[in-house]
Amino acid sequence: MATPPQDRRPIIISGPSGVGKGTLFKRLFEQHPDVFCLSVSHTTRSPRAGERDGVDYHYVSMETFEDLIAKDGFVEHAKFGGNRYGTSKMTIEEQTKKGRVVLLDIEMEGVKQIKQSSISARYIFIAPPSLEALESRLRGRGTEDEASVRKRIDQAYKELDFSKTPGVHDKIIVNDNLHVAYKELEDYIYKPLDS
């Protein structure tokens, strides 16, 4: 049986698009099977090809989503391009009861909302070594057009600025070297409660 960390609170990981959060998550899941799970968000958008309900997202109608908002069912929610996205309290509670440590990949506005909620969590920010390095990574993926790259870089400026706000994040990790960044992430997650 894999060993969970002493601190079992949900872990909120944020950082600009292209910084390598997904790669770090993947390695954490591989190194510690059955300990962590990624919170599956709710969305009102339709599934894309290959996406599965309950795996990629919980796909719900706008009416259902707004009903959950009215019932205070989300720790955070946002609207992008006419669709809503949110992290439900129930999803976090269910996985925590199963003994899993829930990881949430959340953007800046979501971090602000969770800070205002009743959820006790740990906050980690993954930063690029520089904005130039981040821009190079985004362009290197070849999945974005110029307008999209510019939009992501503009957002990265805002997120990096926000990350400097005292008390927002418990830990900031610069992902310059994947092995070093992963070790820093793992050491922080597994640090003893009394340290």
Image: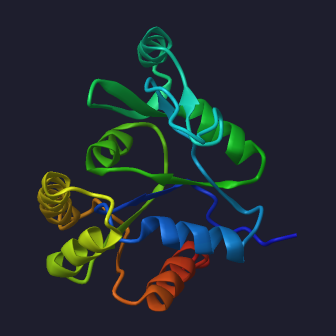
Q: Position of residue 45 (x, y in %)?
A: 43, 26
In the image as oriented, which residue stretches furthest toward the right?
A: 1
Task: Give the number of marks.
Answer: 0
Residue 151 sits above or below residue 124 on the image: above
- The answer to whether one can see residue 162 in this image is yes
Specify the color scheme.
rainbow
- The answer to whether one can see residue 193 in this image is no
Left or right: 18 as drawn, with respect to 147:
right
Relative to the observer, which residue lies in front, 116 or 78? 78
Q: What residue is rendered at 70% in x and 44% in y? A: 95
Q: What residue is rendered at 32% in x and 39% in y? A: 113
Residue 57 sits above or below residue 192 on the image: above
Relative to the observer, which residue lies in front, 159 or 81? 81
Left or right: 57 as drawn, with respect to 86:
right
Quadrant into which the N terminus falls = bottom right
Relative to the observer, which residue lies in front, 82 or 8? 82
Q: In which quarter of the image is residue 171?
A: bottom left
Q: What residue is rendered at 27% in x and 68% in y? A: 138
Q: Quadrant of residue 178?
A: bottom left
Q: Quadrant of residue 160?
A: bottom left
Q: Where is residue 97 in the image (x, y as percent from the top left)?
A: 75, 43
Left or right: 63 as drawn, with respect to 40:
left
Q: Where is residue 162 in the image (x, y as percent from the top left)?
A: 18, 59
Q: Position of residue 77 (x, y in %)?
A: 37, 32
